[in-house]
Image (cartoon, helix red, strand yellow):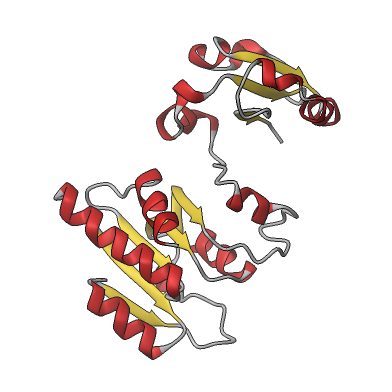
Amino acid sequence: PLAAALHAVTETPPKQGDKVAVLGSGRLGLLIIASLISWRRKMQTSFEIIVFSRRPGQRDVALMLGADKCFLVPRGDSTITKDHHEVFDLVFDTSGSPAGADDAVFMLKKGGILHMKSTDGQKTLGLNFLSDAVVDELQILPLDKLQVRAHTDQIKAVWVSTSINQLESLPAWLREKKIFHLSPSDALKMVQSGDLANYTPFKRFDAAIVSN
């Protein structure tokens, strides 16, 4: 859990002046809070850490660790006050509940980042397999943020859905990668065939570009 918490913070580090929320203050939530405090001290940057907790005891520990504020959200009450609507730049969801992800989206500013650490196995944000994505530490990003947030040097093989007609619309750095312009079913067959081992050590696509 500590390694997961440290990795989460280093992968989505808060910036100067950010407002950061942590949903849930169980073991993983507290470790993320501690990691955020450590990051803030190490980088000598200033950002606000606000925690949403179910239990008074966990709230007290979060504040002791160094969280700036901690709000109690009673069990059974999955709603977040309108005062927290679209005010956060970054939200770490450790709530263990699909409602936590809904709250996180409600709380995020436009263009904000949701880092999910909940793996409840339930349908979340309309997606059936979001827990699998969390376990595999996949990132879901707007295309214009991909080069900023992802390790682009590690991206070798890219699946581009046939829902995107014009490959010329992709960024130039992305077009330099090995592009597979396939339907979802053909992309799945490509993964199952094992042929991707010829292009990437992970034997699956390093990035997927889709459009609705």
Identity of the residue furthest to the left in this view: 44
The relative height of residue 149 versus residue 118 in the rendered view (above or below) is above
Q: Count all numbered tags in the image, as a single digit.
A: 0
Q: Is residue 43 left or right of residue 193?
A: left
Residue 20: % across, % down:
34, 60
Q: Nearer the viewer, residue 66 or 198?
A: 198
Is residue 44 toward the left or the right of residue 167 in the image?
left
Q: Report the residue at 53% width, 23% height from top.
A: 155
Q: Relative to 190, is 22 above or below? A: below
Please name the residue shown 43% across and 35% down the image.
149
- Residue located at (61% from left, 10% from top): 168
Residue 30, how many percent across, how many down?
37, 71
Q: Nearer the viewer, residue 88 or 29?
A: 29
Among the 4 quarters of the image, the one containing residue 194: top right
Is 69 situated above or below 205?
A: below
Q: Which quarter of the figure is the C terminus placed in?
A: top right
Which one is nearer the viewer's eye here, 147 or 170? 147
Q: Residue at x 58, y 17 (%)?
A: 170
Tell me the quarter of the picture where residue 55 sits.
bottom left
> Residue 110 in the image: x percent, y percent?
46, 48
Instruction: Name the quarter where the N terminus is drawn.
Output: bottom left
Decide: is 1 above or below 61.
above
